[in-house]
Image (cartoon, rainbow, N blue to C red):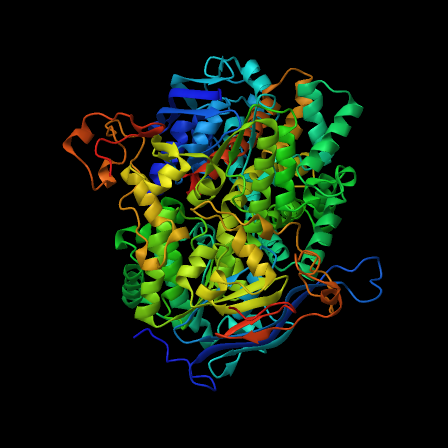
Amino acid sequence: MSAVLDVSDFSVEFRTRSGIVRALDRVAFTVRRGETMALVGESGSGKSVTAYALLGLLDAAGRITRGRAVLEGVDLTAASPSELARIRGKRAAMIFQNPRAALNPIRPIGQQIADVLRRHAGLSRRDAMAGAIDMLKQVGIPDPARRASAYPFELSGGMCQRVMIAIAVATRPALLIADEPTTGLDVTTQAVVMDIVAKLAAETGMATILITHDLALAAERSARIAVMHAGHIVEDAATKTLLANPRHPYTRRLLAATPTAAGSLAALRSIPGNLPDLRRDDLPPCRFAARCDRRLPGCDAKLVWRTIEPAHRIACWNPA
Amino acid sequence: MSSSTLRHARHVVSENPVTGLALLLFAFFVGAAILGPSLAPYDPLASNTMRALQPPSALHWFGTDQIGRDIFSRVLVAARLDLGIAAASVALVFAMGGFAGLASGFFGGWVDMLVGRIADTIMAFPLFVLAMAIVAALGNTVPNIVLATAIINFPLYVRVARAETVQRREAGFVDAARIAGHRDMGVLLRQVGPNIMPIMVVQMSLTMGYAILNAAGLSFIGLGVRAPTPEWGIMVAEGAAFIVSGEWWVALFPGATLMTAVFCFNLLGDGVRDIVDPRRRT
Amino acid sequence: MIGNEPTPPGPDGSTLLDVAELSKRFPLRRKGWFGGGHPSLVHAVDDVSFTLSRGETLGLVGESGCGKSTLVRLITRLTDPTSGSIRFGSRELADLPAKRFARDADRARIQIVFQDAGESINPRFTAADAIADPLRKLKGVTGPDLKAKVEEAATLCGLPVELLDRFPHQLSGGQRARVGIARAIATRPDLLVLDEPTAALDVSVQVTILQLLVRLRETLGMSYVFVSHDLNVVRLLCDRVIVMYLGRIVETGPAEQVFAKPLHPYTRGLVAAVPRLDGVRDGALRLAGDPKSPIDPDPHACRFHGRCPIGTDRCGLDMPALRRFGGGREAACHYAEEPA
């Protein structure tokens, strides 16, 4: 299968009052057609920054300092703002954590989906509305013709997220970025929402990047997981491999802290130390080194990404 | 004020030089209000018909008026009265409107209804006309000008305080305070109150300018402080007659001072918010 | 000594909290100008009974809107019940208006750790102010004594004393959580209600906070009511669990067993929806749809009827009561069966 998105050597910095934040450093990954890949990490790991930077949604303080991100043959890092705007919503779409805030509160939801269809697919007003109702049906909203005239405040959080998904996939994008799409929703609703995303991806061959802090959700919903720590992808492997045979010390630590599979609270282990301050000029090459119990002298010299098995990459000299 | 607050204030000023300018002007006006009478080169009330309507000169920086009083001295001395009225009225409306708004937002129900109706009633009048009516009815005294200026600003304070309180009424720290043994009044005054202070202080700074203008306006139409007391509004009113005959300085200097004072307080608002809000510190 | 006199024991000695037939209904604004007829009522908590023993940790789970937040506000006496009883030790608290309870002697014995520690600490208070507040108000501690007690509480919660003069926005999420816990245990409560205390934290920080809570429960001899949407955390921390649906208890029992072999179809759906690391999913148990409206629900129908995968017409006519099963379990379903 062909790569929909190929990101390589991708770095992002933010200029702030108190120094330059090196938010992403040489991030690289590939997402194929129909594939769901998860970006997993704790807060501050850079997983959301990756999504925003890819789609050209960084605020004025942030900029891409190096690397390429090729979506269907177009390098997003070299695209003009107007090209990016055309790609966003048409070829690459995104859904967010708080769907109600992302919807226009004073416009019926059907209209909001129809707007996308008219702008990006060039449909007539009538056809766009019919398309919108069809989309609402596809995301499992009961009685879609009537619900199309509902306003966001009349819908539950789970329903709002379905509407967001309908807006995102209305134009059949090649790539969907789901940034913590179910955080704040109940587990039952989360399961339904994720089912819908999976169904649409299977039907349209859309590639999905699932950004989440929940390793179990990633395990259940994605074929591949890339674990992020302090702006680095530290490990990237097929989900089964990563869970059965994690090699990077941070991945192992993260798994040991996740309550999902633990038999008792005493069996859980926290991760010592904190994220390094990404504004430091003398940021160590391996940003996990200070918290790592497998540290070698070489860790302070250089960080390299190594492919240890087919499709299993880690950023570590001394893997477990 | 702790040293960290000072450091923060310095930082805010360096980020935003306009705030620095406003602070400088503010210091200048406060200085004039406190020291004005002792700094004035002439007695602001002493007339000298020999030197009436002199244009600005080295001797009389702002010129002299129709009966030969030194305009610079009068403008300087008037600062205390004008700023005093404005400050007193702002303090009064801050206490009344701030508390009414807090209670209205916090308790809701009939308290909210009552406070809301009072504010609506005040808002139903053209505000300056209402101020005129109050002063005309109660008498032409400084306390009444203060009261009138406070009353017309009351709805503004109620609205701001109420809106800010409603936002925080459900905040976790309000429940936490109840769990810690605070009763309603304690939660209101010690927990919610300090949290709406930053926005109220900004409000005070903004309404200071408006209050100065209102007090001067009342005097301008003869319903406030009376001649010969030096006051910016009266001075503009008296000087207005001479603009046609070419003696522009009689009205211009008190008018320009009035404008600068209002301008200064309006500019101060945003800077003050940055300084008093602890969350803007790093 | 800051500790409270021990809460006098309840009738059977080991019970700390005995909640019986507790209900809370909120009236909706009446329609029309003259408000004819009865106002509609939101049944937030409906006929809830349970007990909590000394030293026990009771989990409270359910979807948003199931009434767990209201139940928390009732047992912490932040709000007044419509009917029912809340016995704390040997004392009935349900009749005592929340306003009066604010300065009651038992206020110090029932404390709460709030969901979002960032939001529940007054932004104009330092960490020390926040921890000192209940000590001052409820225990009358002042001066150097107060400083010592604040530092003691902070140390117990693993909060470095150097951080005490910081404002909440200058602390990390984990440190804020510790401030919230230190404030709640400062008066040495017997009952500590934990309302999603780790919901906003990363897993690596969550672990340390959960382990801290277990340690504190043992050293200070507290009982916990632990509210969480994270069933895995509830499973690890709680002895028993209560599952709520639309204001009512649908299942209760030992946490381990309830999650391993749920009796009620709602619990089954809830457990099946939790993502697992082995990636095995039980799609057959997917709960679709949303809960019914909590406004004036049909008193004769099961609240889960309509969304329930196994419900029959009987469930629409006959509201199931909690039935006892083996192993100290209870479930409110006509079709629940004895666990194998």
Q: Does residue C108 appear in the picture of this structure?
A: yes
Picture coordinates of residue B273, whole percent (x, y): 48, 39
Residue A9 lies, with reference to residue A149, above or below; the image says above
Kindly give the residue lying farthest to the left in the view shown.
A297
Left or right: where A184 falls relative to B6: right
Picture coordinates of residue A47, whole percent (x, y): 42, 33
Residue B110 lies, with reference to residue C327, above or below; the image says above
Rendered-image quadrant of the C terminus of chain A: top left
Q: Nearer the viewer, residue C142 or C170?
A: C170
Picture coordinates of residue A51, whole percent (x, y): 47, 28
Residue in the picture at 48% in, 87% down? C11
Q: Nearer the viewer, residue A34 or B51?
A: A34
Picture coordinates of residue A1, whole percent (x, y): 49, 22
Residue B124 lies, with reference to residue A168, above or below; the image says below
Residue B10 lies, with reference to residue C211, above or below; the image says above
Q: Does residue B40 appear in the picture of this structure?
A: no
Can you tell which quarter of the image residue B169 is in? Answer: bottom right
Q: Nearer the viewer, residue B262 or C253?
A: C253
How many numbered marks appear? Answer: 0
Can you tell which quarter of the image residue C63 is in? Answer: bottom right
Left or right: where B33 falls relative to C321: left
